[in-house]
């Protein structure tokens, strides 16, 4: 029963972290679009920190699963893991978009 509670808590943590990663990444994109690159970088750092928090929680749970074969990941955990990893993929794309906005801004500044 305790393992199930722990898995549920970790799952909710992953969902929370994934949501925060996504929010901070899109805040970074909005700031980059407005040529506020320092703010964009700050938001991307916050997104990275949130991702690391979720990823570390996920890994601790998976280590428990590996050590105790009676613990089986449930549907909520699988969904939460997918949520976190999708947020990571969005963050990676937003890194690239911020980079493109920065380059575009430099080009338009010189003309």
Image (cartoon, rainbow, N blue to C red):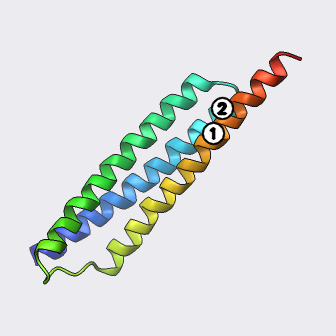
Q: Is residue 72 left or right of residue 29?
A: left
Horizontally, residue 5 falls left or right of residue 108, namely left
Q: Looking at the rendering, in which quadrant would you find the C terminus?
A: top right
Residue at point 38%, 55% (across, down): 16
Residue at image location 26% in from the left, 63% down from the top: 10
What percent of the width, then of the height, locates residue 73?
Answer: 27, 78
SS at mark 1 in the image:
helix
| Residue 58 versus residue 33 in the image, above or below | below
* Picture residue at 50% right of the left edge, 37% below the top: 44
Label 1 sits on residue: 29
How many discs appear? 2
Give the crowd class for mark 2: few <14, some 14-19, many >=20 residues within 10 Å: many
Looking at the image, the residue that sits furthest to the top is 110
| SS under mark 2 | helix
Compared with 27, 65 (above or below) is: below
Q: Measuring from the top left, give residue 31's x and y in whole percent.
A: 63, 31
Q: Position of residue 29 (x, y in %)?
A: 63, 39
Q: In the image, 34: left or right of 80?
A: right
Residue at image position (25%, 60%) is 59
Residue denoted by label 2: 32
Tell me whether circle 2 and circle 1 mark residues in contact (CB < 8 Å): yes
At which x and y percent is residue 18? Answer: 43, 55
Q: Quadrant of the N terminus?
A: bottom left
Q: Which mark is residue 92?
A: none
User: Considering only vertical position in the picture, is 3 above or below 83?
Assistant: below
């Amino acid at each position: 029963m305790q393992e199930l509670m722990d898995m549920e808590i970790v799952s909710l943590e992953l969902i929370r972290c994934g949501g925060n990663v996504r929010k901070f990444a899109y805040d970074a994109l909005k700031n980059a679009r407005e040529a506020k690159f320092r703010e964009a970088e700050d938001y991307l750092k916050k997104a990275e920190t949130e991702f690391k928090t979720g990823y570390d929680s996920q890994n601790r749970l998976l280590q428990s699963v590996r050590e105790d074969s009676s613990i089986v990941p449930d549907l909520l955990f699988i969904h939460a893991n997918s949520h976190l990893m999708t947020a990571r993929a969005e963050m990676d794309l937003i890194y690239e978009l911020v980079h493109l906005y920065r380059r575009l801004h430099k080009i338009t500044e010189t003309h």
